[in-house]
Image (tube, rainbow, N blue to C red):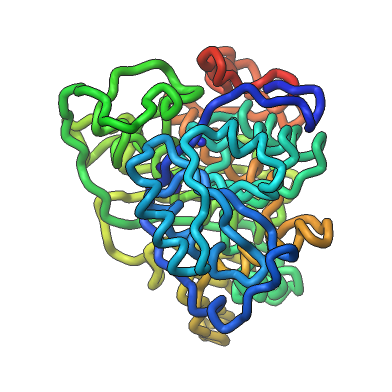
């Protein structure tokens, strides 16, 4: 699944739940940064379980395994056919083989596991995180943090109640050049920043319909569906297509877009928008199974900060904007800053480029930050509450598209003003043992 899976009164209570999910969304490894460091002794390492071993989960798990103060002791996936090969890949990195598990409950009840890494499809991120916190585990969860707004709020509540470190996988929060830019903005170099623009311009593909079929041997389809509606097995749901269906994914605004929305919100120094308006459509990917738009423009206004955030998305256009496929621009009266993962530039009066720097982006600092916060009790660079605020922007943008009108958001009530239709979509009913708890 991606990059993409009880309501107990105490951490020690037995956890009656199932899960074990897969990962999706390809990732590159940044192992070179970690290989130069020697492993800590076994009793000094943080014991990690990777939940979801395909795609995104594959890369993140190997990166954790390469870090000196981490040990991937368990790997978990609803598709047991994937576990052996992935265990061997982890062994090649850390020289020890993790225990394969298909049922998440076994991981949560295992007191030797210190932290879980949730790299499942989006619809499992919230429940796996909440269950993990209830079981006393620290959590590294991929973005977007949730499939809907209510789930995200419950994740924050669980992290606070059980005093767990929950880091969201928006890795730019730990990247040196992004931190440098935030310091430059805060210094007033370009004056008061009134607008940020985030964009996601890349080439995706259509997803033609395929018929429902038998569940593959070794795959627990009931667990894979988790909190989502009960549907027949379909290859599009299990593989690439899930990201573009509202039951499971949040479109690319909640996928890659959350990275850029998070950077833009960080730079503006804002929390919750007051007004949200989305113009979106399926302009190119027509006639296929995708429910989410391929073209999207969303504006968010933050009156108390005299600021606006604009998000643009084109999934049929692999051409860079301002030099970056995915990027963010910050505009002030004295200049503007453009940043992407490969670098950034500062443009000042008379359009003079004052600074232009290249960057080497890696997720390793973000993983290290998570582990260090477990040891020292500090707040991680992208704490779950920050992840909630950024993911909320994607949810609100998508909801404005789905109902076809602007939204007015009440940050105190965490609801949309006078819009029962939208407020009903802030959460889902859930299924039996996979309900998101009303009280964590």
Dividing the picture into quadrants, the one containing residue 419 is top right
Dividing the picture into quadrants, the one containing residue 206 is top left
* Residue at x 42%, y 29% (from the top left corner): 224
Q: Position of residue 47 (x, y in %)?
A: 65, 55
**Direction from residue 145 to residue 296 in the image, left or right:** left
**Direction from residue 317 to residue 143 in the image, left or right:** right
Q: Position of residue 248 (x, y in %)?
A: 42, 30
Q: Position of residue 114 (x, y in %)?
A: 70, 49
The image quadrant where one finds the C terminus is top right
* Residue at x 32%, y 29% (from the top left corner): 291
The answer to whether 417 is drawn above or below residue 300 in the figure is above
| Residue 309 can be seen, yes or no | no
Q: How many marks?
A: 0
| Residue 307 can be seen, yes or no | yes
* Residue at x 36%, y 56% (from the top left corner): 26
The answer to whether 280 is drawn above or below residue 7 in the figure is below
The image quadrant where one finds the N terminus is top left
**Direction from residue 7 to residue 219 in the image, left or right:** left
Closest to the observer: 90 or 186? Answer: 90
* Residue at x 49%, y 79% (from the top left corner): 32
The answer to whether 413 is drawn above or below residue 36 in the figure is above
Closest to the observer: 175 or 69? Answer: 69
Q: Position of residue 240 (x, y in %)?
A: 29, 41
């Amino acid at each position: 699944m991606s990059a993409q899976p009880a309501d107990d009164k105490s951490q020690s209570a037995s956890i009656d739940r199932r899960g074990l999910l897969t990962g999706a969304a390809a990732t590159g490894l940044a192992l070179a940064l970690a290989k130069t460091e020697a492993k800590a002794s076994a009793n000094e390492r943080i014991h990690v379980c990777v939940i979801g071993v395909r795609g995104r989960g594959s890369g993140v798990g190997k990166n954790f395994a390469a870090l000196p103060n981490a040990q991937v002791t368990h790997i978990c996936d609803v598709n047991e056919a994937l576990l052996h090969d992935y265990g061997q890949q982890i062994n090649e990195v850390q020289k020890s083989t993790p225990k394969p598990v298909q049922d998440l409950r076994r991981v949560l009840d295992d007191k030797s596991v210190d932290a879980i890494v949730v790299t499942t499809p989006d619809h499992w991120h919230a429940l796996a995180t909440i269950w993990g916190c209830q079981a006393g585990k620290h959590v590294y969860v991929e973005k977007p943090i949730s499939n809907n707004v209510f789930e995200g709020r419950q994740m924050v509540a669980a992290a606070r109640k059980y005093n767990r470190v929950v880091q969201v996988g928006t890795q730019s929060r730990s990247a040196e050049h992004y931190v440098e830019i935030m310091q430059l903005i805060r210094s007033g170099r370009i004056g008061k920043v009134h607008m940020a623009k985030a964009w996601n311009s890349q080439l995706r593909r259509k997803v033609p319909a395929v018929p429902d079929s038998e569940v593959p041997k070794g795959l627990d389809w009931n667990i894979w569906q988790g909190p989502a509606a009960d549907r027949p097995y379909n290859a599009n749901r299990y593989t690439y297509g899930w990201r573009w269906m509202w039951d499971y994914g949040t479109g690319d605004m909640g996928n890659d877009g959350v990275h850029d929305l998070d950077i833009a919100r960080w730079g503006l120094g804002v929390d919750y928008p007051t007004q949200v308006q989305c113009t979106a459509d399926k302009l190119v990917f027509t006639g296929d199974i995708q429910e989410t738009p391929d073209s999207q423009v969303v504006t968010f206004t933050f009156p108390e900060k005299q600021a606006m955030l604009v998000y643009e998305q084109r999934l049929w256009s692999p051409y860079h904007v301002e030099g970056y496929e995915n990027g963010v621009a910050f505009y002030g009266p004295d200049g503007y800053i453009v940043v992407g993962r490969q670098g950034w530039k500062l443009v000042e009066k008379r359009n003079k480029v004052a600074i232009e720097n290249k960057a080497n982006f890696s997720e390793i600092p973000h993983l290290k930050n998570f582990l260090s916060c477990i040891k020292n009790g500090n707040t991680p660079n992208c704490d779950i509450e920050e992840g909630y605020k950024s993911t909320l922007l994607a949810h609100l943008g998508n909801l404005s598209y789905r109902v076809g009108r602007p939204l007015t958001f009440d940050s105190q009530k965490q609801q949309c003003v006078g819009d029962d239709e939208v407020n009903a979509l802030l959460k889902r009913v859930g299924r039996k043992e996979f309900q998101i708890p009303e009280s964590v």
